[in-house]
Every structure is written in structure tokens, then in C-alpha cells.
Image (cartoon, grey):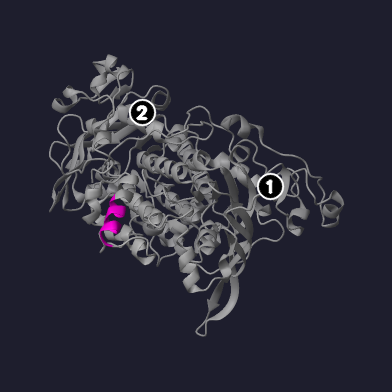
Amino acid sequence: MTTPLLAVRDLRRYFPIKRGVFGRVTGHVRAVDGVSFHVGAAETLALVGESGCGKSTTGRAILRLIEPTSGSVTFDGEDVLALDGARMRKLRRRMQIVFQDPFSSLNPRMSIGSIVREGLIIHHIAEGAAADARVRQLLEEVGLRSEYASRYPHEFSGGQRQRVGIARALSVEPSFIVCDEPVSALDVSVQAQVVNLLQDLQRDRGLSYLFIAHDLSVVEHIADRVAVMYLGHIVEMAPVQRVFSVPLMPYTQALLSAVPAPEPGLKHSRILLAGDVPSPANPPSGCVFHPRCQHPARDAACAGIVPPLEEKAPGHFAACIKQTPTTVSWEQQKSAGGTKPPELFVPPSLAAATY
Amino acid sequence: MTAPLLEIESLRTYFYTDAGVARAVDGVSLRVDAGETVGVVGESGCGKSVTALSILRLILPPGRIEAGSAIRFEDKNLLEMTEREVQRVRGNRISMVFQEPMTALNPVFTVGDQIAEVARIHAGMSKRDAAAKAVEMLKLVGIPAPEQRANEYPHQLSGGMRQRVVIAMALVMNPALVIADEPTTALDVTIQAQILELLADLTRRLGTSVLLITHDLGVVAEHCTRVIVMYAGEVVEETITTGLFSAAHHPYTEGLLGAMPRIGRHAERLATIPGTVPPPTAWPVGCRFRDRCQYAWDRCEREHPPLYQIDVAHVSRCHLAEEPERRAHPHPPLAAERGASAA
């Protein structure tokens, strides 16, 4: 097996909760609570989940824009978390990020030409006239006219600003880009333009993406593999067709069934989750999803046993002790108070409605 | 035929800005019948939210509803009413659910007090009755432990819970019409499903009409009987929902449907609509979509298309209705030739 471009192991990021005038730490928000995954060369791994599941924190922790609490991140053989400031800055040339909000992520006082140029200068890639030429080339490449280099961000629409953000990321010739909800602030017609651009760039430059998103239809379109996060954990990870056709984690099943189907009459039976996502400061015991789970075999064992992210089918990982096959034996489950043996559960309506 | 509950006729809402007159809503006509859920879709800047605010007369200067517009609700023209009369309609007969529940709620009052306020002002209830009504409404919208929740402040509730509170406030007076402006856009998809089911269930039980404003065609497909597509301040297509998805007529609608990635449909590339919406201070003459349209021809430049009747209950603002053979010859739109860069 070849080594992946990016390998993340047991990554954690806890945020302290401070109370009172002395800022006494009374607990921790476990935003990211032990996630492991890898991204191969020219591959797109999508990280999906709802607000507060830890997907953006994961993306930022990999680039050390937020320092992880523990875990390891290996990029092209280098231990990212062990690097000092100077060497980390150097590595950032190869690992870039495109942010969600194209309005707050561009400096309003800089022309878009200087925004894109900045990386070239800092990383000593080009100077003077050569840098200007490179900026023009980059703008053309993302579908903006090079004459616009002297204009300012407020003169552009949301989709065009997002193109500037992409040109800025590309300027230093990275091999890996964290795309943090890059299209969720855009209208659907503009979103399609940006999604196509990201795919073209990947094909032409062999880029790898960690594509963070909550919109499952965009993810299905762009991703090779999908990791589903819930309350700081990866609960399912598989090739994209597997996740959308045979989702094994009950949470993924509910998430997919909640997407409104743009076909009138084709109303699939919806799994309506009860209640809200619990607080990551005080997550449920055992399986973090168990209080809202609809699996027919859910029982006391789910509250007692932390489910391992285990391989249920080749390349298809899920964290559910009730979904067969499982390495957590029925005996173990019974001793944790289990009363219902594990069984394979995929709502038939779900697979039928989407495929 | 019974009179429609709400009938808007050639509504024009203009904003007089330093950059010129922004014709945000420019001749919109639509109707909502009793018990019906009508969707209004379109992208940012198409005028859908300004249409909603105009119905409630919530347009502030430099905005103005132009003379010649009419908004008839329960047989009265809202635009001819005094402010006092409009206040009796607002919150009473027509209420609104906004996109952002955090800004729609007052952070310094408990949610119970805010719901009770509606009952006290509009129904003249006593403090005690209004407080009881607030708890009853919280229960109706499925908030667990409503007696305790009534004493909590908005920041103590999750986004989904807050939106339930906003819906509770909107339904206190059992209005005939609820205008929901992107009610679930700020919410996660599983919470969105809960809230839309709740809204559909309650309005069905109470017989309330809903004008649902959204950019999400999936939401429209599941919840609306009729749909109105807006572009550049105008209605460009209107039909029953099934018709929109099986037989969209207007090239803009066609483009929207193609640009939307759909689970289970494996497209190599997404279709795009090149270019961007023109600024509302300078709508092009002729067809406003023509620069982005793959069928546009010289007529589209000269002649502003009217709403053509395509079928029973299906209208479209496109000259293709008269020259359908041109659909067989698409060409790259002008905006694509100019590049995506027309700022």
C-alpha cells in the first residue's frame, strides 16, 4: 500500500469552558474527539455533518490554524504537529484552505491582485513583473478577467470572490486544499460554477481536497470518499456510492432521509430525528448518537459500550455495535445490559428513493 | 369561483438609493388561495423577500411601494389602509416567520413573554390568560416541558427550538396566511425536516395558507402545491409544482434545475448558468435573462416578454412560447462568451 498524502490519527481538540472571574476551567467542549482518516493523492474526502459536529475544527486543526489538543497529522511523510513556526509556514505552501464566507475572508483594503500576489512574495515564488504575470494567469485560470487585478473585493459578487479565494490558495501551488464549505454561501447557479471549477482544477493539477460540507447533494457530486461526523466523532466512512446507497450508521440514514427530494411525489419515508444534537461539553455515554437512534436493536448496551469505527464491508467503516457484522460480540453486549441482538438495518425506502 | 385569499397585482417596490432607483420588485402579480401552500423561489436579489415585506407593508425609506400596485387580502386593499388598520391585519390575519430566529426574537424577554405579548396585544387577553396561551402554543409546536421553556430566554434554546418559538408566535392568532421567508435556511438538514413537517402539519390542521419563500427547489417539491419562480424583480414562471419539475418552460427555471446537484443523479459536470444577475438599478430592456440564456435571439433584446400561457395554470415569461422551434438550437449565452467576469 502506498502511503497517503495526509494521514490523521486520533486527532482531538478540546476547548476549555471557563467560569467566574478567575477563569476557572469547569469542563471541556470536545469539539473533535479522536478522529482518524487519510486523504490520498488527487482524492477528495468529504467531511460531512451538521453544525457543531467538529468538521470545521478538524479542517483547521490539520493546518494548525487551531492547535490540536492531541493526535498526529502526517503530511507527505512529515509530522505536521512537531514543526516549529518557520517550518510550518513553509509547509503551508503545500497545504492551503478556501474559506466559506467570501465576504469576510478577503481583506477589503487590498486589491484582488495584491491578495493573490501576497503568497507569491511571502514564499519567494516570484517577484516584480514575474509575480504580476503569475497573478494575471491565476485569475484567468479561475475564470476572472486579468484586468480585474486592480479592483477591490466589494466590486465582485459572492461567486467571483470565492474564485479569488481559490486563486489565492492556488498561487503557492499546493498539493492539498481544505475546502471549508466553499459553496454553501452561494446561490445554486453560482454554486454549480464553483463546484465545476474545483473539479477542473483537481483534474488539471492532481490536487487533493478535504471537502467540508453540510450539503449532501454537493458532496455526492464531488467526493470520492465520505466521512460522516457527529459530536466530534467520525461515525461512518466509505466510498461515496456506498454511503449514499447503503448507509450503515443510523445517523447517516437519518441525515440522508432529511434531504428534500427535488422530485414531487417521490416523497421517501423520512426518519425524523427526535430532539436536538446534545452538547459536546456533555456528550452521551457509549455511542454518542444512541439517545436519538432509530435502529430497531438499540438497547442499554448502546449507552454502555463505545462503538469502534469498524470495517463492516470492504472499505466501509461504521461505528455501530448493532449493525452486523460487528467485532463487539453479543456476549459483551449482553454483559453491558444488551437485550436485542445486532441485526443489519437499512431502511428500504431510503435506498429505493435515492437509487 | 371563490375570491383568492391574497391577490397581488402589479406590485412595484422601488428603492431610491444614491446609485439610482433599484427596482427590486417590478410588476409582480400572484395569488394565494385559502388553505394553499405556494412557493416563491429565486436566487439572491430576485425580489422574493421584498415581495414578502411589501405584503405586510414593512418597506422603509428609501424603499417605496409605487402607485398602481394593489395587494388585496380578504377583499381589502392593504395598500389603501391606514397604518392603524394594517397593524390589525399584521400578526392577526397575516403573520410572518423569518429566516433567522435569533434576530426575530428579543434577547431580553423570555420566549413565554414574547408569545404572550402577541396574545395580549392582538386578542386583548389578560396577563394570566396570555401566559397560559403561551404555554399552550409551545406545546403545540412540540417543545418538551413547555412550562419551563416558557421562562427561558432565546439564547438558552437551540436554533431549531427558536424557530419553533417563532412559529408559535406566528400562529397565536390563528392567522389566515403565514408568510415564511426562508424559514429553515439557517438550520441543519435534520432540523429543517422537523420544522417543515411541523409547519405543514399545523397549517393543514388549522387551514392556514402559506406563502413559502425559499431558494431550495427540494423544499418546494415536497411542500408546495403551486410554485412561482422569480428573476430580476419579476415572476418568470408559475405552475403547479409537478409541472415545474417535469416540464419547466422558462430557460432560467431549466437552468436552476440543471445546476442543482441531486442525490442519485450522476452528472459528470453540473450545468451552470453563466454570468450573474444584473444590478436592480439597471435591468436590461427586453428580456432580463437574455445575456445568460442559451436560446436568446434578437427579439429578446427588443421586446420585453409578457407572461405567456403555456398550459392550464402554467405561465412563462419567455418568447419561446411563441417560437418553440428555437429550443432545438441552443448556443453559448452572451455572458459565457464574455467570461464569468462581468462584475
Specify the segment rendered in magenta.
Answer: A128-136
Q: Amino acid at mark 2?
A: Glu
**What kind of element bears circle 1?**
strand
Mark 1 on the same chain as mark 2 = no
Taking the magenta stretch, the answer to whether it contains residue A134 is: yes
Q: Which residue is mark 1?
A: A317
Is the N terminus of chain B in the top left, top right, bottom left or bottom right quadrant?
A: top left
Is B38 placed left or right of A352 in the picture?
left
B109 is higher (above) or lower (below) than A248: below
Tell me where residue B286 appears, x and y as whole percent. Answer: 16, 29
Mark 1 closeness class: few <14, some 14–19, many ≥20 residues within 10 Å: many
Kindly identify the residue that appears in the image at 48 percent across and 73 percent down: A85
Is residue A350 or residue A140 the one in the foreground? A140
Q: Give the percent coordinates (x, y) of residue B274.
A: 30, 36
**Residue A213 locus on image (x, y percent):** 49, 49
Q: Position of residue B329 (x, y in %)?
A: 30, 19
Q: Is residue A270 shown left or right of residue B204?
A: right
- Disc sitting over residue B254 in the figure: 2
C-alpha span from label 1 to label 2 = 38 Å
Residue type marked 1? Phe
